[in-house]
Amino acid sequence: MLVTLKGSTEKIDDWSHKLICNIPALYFDEYEYTVAVRSIFLDFFNDDNTRPEDNFIILKTDLVDKSVINPDQSIASFYKKILNRSDYNYIFYEPAILQKYKIQLPSLASTQFIFSTLRADQLINITYTEIILEITRYARI
């Protein structure tokens, strides 16, 4: 199933922004499920009206387990140039290969999503975000 999350972000610090949106009340039954990021759209705004050039962005969530292999609980990381089209400064990311992560929470509703950047930027704000997640039953052969 595909789940679309639309909203804005709240700045935590110069590196991190927490997603603010209405997350659907989706509960996972006794089966195991995986999550993968299908696409991410971010609309940027700078407080001083300048345009950021680029950044390395990581999407972290407590939906997946913290482990030695994935200590940041990241489900997507990418480097993109920020595109400037009319009034928009945006990034669109779509992975070439879906990376699936085993879901560790019983519900999607209690999940937090945080965007982190590699470079600190005091002026940058993410005004709008849209994330499309693919959630599937975990089938091991």
Image (spheres, rainbow, N blue to C red):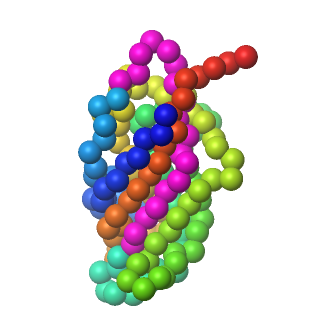
- Residue 42 inside the magenta-drawn segment: yes
Q: Residue furthest right?
A: 141
Q: Position of residue 63 (x, y in %)?
A: 43, 34
Q: Is residue 14 left or right of residue 116?
A: left
Q: Residue at x 30, y 59 (%)?
A: 8
Q: Is residue 38 visible?
A: yes
Q: What residue do we see at 29% from left, 31% from top?
A: 25
Quarter of the picture holding the C terminus:
top right
Q: What's the magenta bit mostly, secondary-structure-wise?
A: strand
Image quadrant where residue 24 sits: top left
Is residue 73 something that shows in the picture? no
Extreme residue toward the top, this view:
30
Residue 126: give x, y in percent of width and height: 36, 66
Looking at this rendering, what residue extends furthest in the front direction?
1
Query: Is 111 drawn above or below residue 127 in the view shown?
Result: above
Q: 6 or 116, which lies in front? A: 6
The residues colored magenta run 27-44
Residue 7 in the image, given as x and y percentages of width and height? 31, 56
Residue at 42% x, 86% y: name it.
86
Q: Quadrant of residue 77?
A: bottom right
63 to 13, vertically: above or below: above
Image side of residue 60 versus residue 96, left or right: left
Q: Nearer the viewer, residue 55 or 134?
A: 134
Q: Nearer the viewer, residue 125 or 90?
A: 90
Residue 102 part of the magenta-drawn span: no
Q: Residue at x 50, y 15 (%)?
A: 31
In the picture shown, does residue 87 fall above or below 141? below
Choose between 73 and 113: the one closer to the eye.
Answer: 113
Along the horizontal axis of the image, is 69 left or right of 114? Answer: right
